[in-house]
């Protein structure tokens, strides 16, 4: 077979480029047609208040809504500025590792818990980077309150290659406890964070407990519990069934993450921003995505989802009110057919203090027809306070979180 000349190579490259451009043009045309069909198929906007809501109820809801927006607006009055980290388009690179973990003994430690236990104390605000090699780490891990400013990196820069898993449930007996003593949801975690300024990147956190039966009072099985301030996660996965992510308290940021579960699988009373995260409801029949626990309107807590998607199997409510003043907002999120038409569940609570809102969402699950009358469809002005990363006071702590510039909130 004759060897190719340089000209043959150039001609071959030109042909490949022309083919690529042609394919891109065809793909663009296809998307334009699909977009037009989607626009034609979408229902016309309906009132935020269904006709079955009385005038008195409508006025009360409006007053509550305006008060809530004003409160959040004052909390983020610093404006929509993101942290002062220069935006970089370069690839993420593994930082210098202060310690390493590998199951085969090739690192400083064989277990993640051992690496965390060895983090030096008294470092002030100097961040300690633990790099974890490819593998499945079957261990129950706790980051104690004394281990602040720690970053846990999956060294392959791929969350599917570094997994931390354990299988406790709320019904698991307490090791060394009294007869009949159980862990409960709080201590059923695979990975618990009790220190400030923790970040994790490219890690999968999984609770491997079996799917609980519907209504099982001991079916809770937490993958991650975050119980202190300034928690950040980038390109991580959270996998479980009931109570997957316990966003317990504090300011928290999740960017480009994957969260999977069935019942109350994002729950707690943190002030949390989920940006560009994909949420998968692994539901057989009926499930609940969030269970936010804000007790009063005076608390500056709540969950905000911006961008990303909600997909899965079965049917799922976007949230049910764990607290009397639960607050959850979805902004610019694709909502698949897995979302129940009602959207939200008050869980037996009065609706006067619950704040559930949606803004500029897309997909079949975003249709307003059938939505409960006490939830809100926000205008651009009303959504602005929730669109600001200052909702989590981002500029005050994210620049020192150990996240790469690519993870800056938009």
Image (cartoon, grey):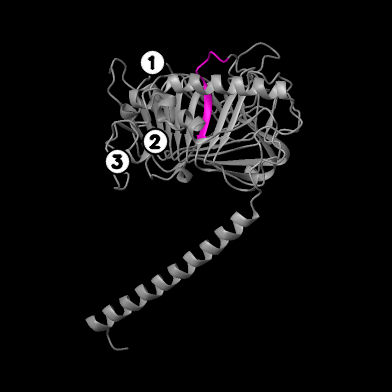
Q: Secondary structure at mark 1?
A: loop
Q: CA distance from mark 1 to mark 3?
A: 32 Å
The answer to which of marks 3 and 2 sits earlier in the sequence is 3
- Which residue position is annotated with label 1? 146
In the displayed structure, would residue 225 be above or below residue 284? Answer: above
Q: CA distance from mark 3 to mark 2?
A: 10 Å
Q: Are marks 1 and 2 in contact (CB under 8 Å)?
A: no
Left or right: 391, with 173 as reference point: left
Residue sitting at x 62%, y 28%: 221
The quarter holding residue 240 reads top right
- Which residue position is annotated with label 2? 409
Circle 1 or circle 2, nearest the eye: 2
The answer to which of marks 1 and 3 sits earlier in the sequence is 3
- Tell me which segment is drawn in magenta: 297-305
- Which residue position is annotated with label 3? 87
Q: CA distance from mark 1 to mark 2?
A: 28 Å
The answer to which of marks 1 and 2 sits earlier in the sequence is 1
Q: Is residue 246 magenta?
A: no
């Amino acid at each position: 077979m004759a060897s190719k000349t340089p000209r043959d190579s150039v001609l071959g490259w030109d042909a490949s480029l022309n083919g690529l451009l042609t394919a891109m043009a065809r793909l663009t045309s296809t998307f334009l047609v699909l977009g037009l069909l989607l626009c034609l198929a979408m229902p016309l906007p309906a009132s935020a208040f269904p006709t079955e809501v009385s005038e008195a109820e409508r006025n009360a809801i409006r007053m509550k809504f305006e008060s809530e927006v004003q409160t959040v607006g004052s909390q983020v009055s610093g404006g929509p500025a993101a942290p002062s980290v220069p935006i970089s388009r370069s690839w993420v690179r593994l930082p210098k590792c202060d310690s390493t973990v590998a199951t085969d003994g090739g690192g400083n430690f064989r277990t993640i818990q051992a690496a965390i236990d060895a983090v030096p104390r008294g470092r002030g605000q100097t961040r300690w980077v633990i790099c974890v090699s490819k593998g499945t780490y079957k261990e129950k891990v706790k980051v104690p309150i004394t281990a602040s400013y720690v970053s846990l990196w999956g060294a392959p820069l791929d969350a599917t290659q570094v997994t931390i898993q354990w299988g406790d449930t709320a019904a698991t007996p307490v090791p060394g406890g009294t007869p009949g003593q159980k862990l409960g949801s709080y201590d059923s975690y695979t990975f618990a964070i009790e220190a400030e300024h923790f970040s994790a990147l490219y890690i999968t956190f999984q609770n491997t407990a079996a799917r609980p039966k519907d209504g099982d009072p001991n079916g809770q099985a937490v993958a991650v519990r975050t119980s202190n301030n300034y928690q950040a996660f980038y390109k991580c996965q959270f996998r479980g069934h009931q109570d997957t992510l316990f966003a317990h308290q504090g300011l928290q940021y999740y960017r480009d993450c994957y969260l999977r579960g069935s019942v109350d699988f994002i729950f707690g009373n943190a002030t949390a921003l989920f940006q560009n995260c994909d949420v998968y409801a692994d539901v057989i029949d009926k499930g609940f995505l969030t269970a936010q626990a804000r007790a009063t309107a005076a608390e500056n807590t709540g969950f905000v989802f911006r961008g990303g998607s909600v997909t899965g199997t079965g049917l799922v409510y976007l949230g049910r009110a764990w607290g009397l003043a639960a607050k959850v907002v979805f902004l610019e999120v694709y909502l698949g057919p897995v979302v129940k038409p009602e959207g939200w569940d008050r869980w037996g609570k009065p609706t006067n203090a619950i704040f559930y809102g949606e803004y500029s969402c897309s997909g079949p699950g975003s249709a307003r027809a059938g939505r409960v009358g006490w939830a809100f469809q926000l205008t651009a002005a009303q959504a602005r306070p929730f669109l600001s990363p200052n909702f989590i006071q981002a500029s005050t702590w994210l620049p020192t979180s150990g996240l790469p510039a690519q993870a800056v909130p938009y």
